[in-house]
Amino acid sequence: MGAIVAIVGRPNVGKSTFFNRLIQRREAIVDAVSGVTRDRHYGKSDWNGKEFSIIDTGGYVLGSDDIFEQAIDKQVELAIDEADAILFMVDVETGITGMDEDVAKLLRKVKKPVFLVVNKVDNAKRAEEAVEFYSLGLGDYFTVSSINGSGTGDLLDAVVEVL
Ligand code: GDP
Ligand code: MG
């Protein structure tokens, strides 16, 4: 199957928006033919000539509150098992939440490459606000805007480096 990159994180941080941006070039052709927007959680992408599979782990969140924490743990566990690199996405708009801290705690024990990705950094002010994510204890982070695409190139340069 080749290298696998998994995107983990609590709901609403922008995982699917980022995923769709990565697979867009390939999937756009298929979607134009079928004429439907599909809810996809697996796709292929490539950067700097390196191909990889990408998993949007949001697919494992089942949307019921009582199983919610469990679902988050499950998606992180699956990512740890299956992926060669893990993108842990957080959201500068809401800042750090308890669920972010829970995921960070799990990921701090992981031996595989973990990239902390601060999403929704749409402007310079938000880039400054992103410093709070150092407190998750995962070291340095990448800032991206999945909506306007900024920062994604630098992130992908670093990701394909470890694949
Ligand atoms: P997921 O639940 O983690 O998959 O998050 P989604 O991709 O569904 O995005 C949740 C919401 O955040 C949507 O309304 C997106 O349009 C919005 N969003 C995603 N990325 C960005 C971004 O870079 N900037 C801003 N301002 N909003 C974003
Ligand atoms: Mg999603």
Image (tube, grey):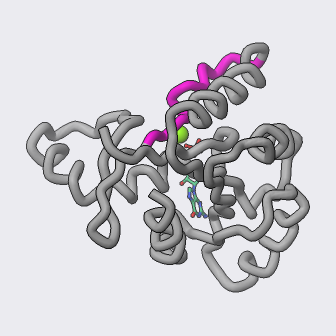
**Residue 78 horizontal side relative to residue 33, left or right:** right
Q: Nearer the viewer, residue 143 or 95?
A: 143
29 up-or-down from 106: above or below = below
> Which residue corresponds to the image point at 62% horizontal and 48% vertical from the top-left?
112
Q: How far across and down, in percent of the image, does residue 75 sit?
A: 61, 29
Q: Residue 52 lies in magenta, yes or no?
A: no
Q: Quadrant of residue 58?
A: top right
Q: How many marks?
A: 0
- In the image, what residue occupies the spot 75% across and 82% down? 125
Name the spot of residue 22 as percent of width and height, x first: 38, 57
Taking the spot 39% from the left edge, 58% from the top edge, the residue there is: 21
Q: Is residue 147 visible?
A: no
Q: Quadrant of residue 110?
A: top right
Looking at the image, residue 24 lies above or below residue 125: above
- Give, as a single range, the part of the protein colored magenta: 55-65
Q: Which residue of the protein is positioned furthest toward the left in this rendering?
A: 33
Quadrant of the rendering where the C terminus is positioned = bottom left
Please say whether residue 61 is one of the residues in the magenta stretch: yes
Q: Nearer the viewer, residue 33 or 2?
A: 2
Give x and y (percent) for residue 7: 55, 46
Tell me the quarter of the image containing the N terminus: top left
Most foreground residue, 68 or 87: 87
Q: Residue at x 77, y 24 (%)?
A: 69
Res. 37 in view: yes
Q: Relative to 60, is 114 on the left or the right? A: right
Q: Is residue 147 left or right of residue 46?
A: right
Residue projecting furthest to the bottom: 124
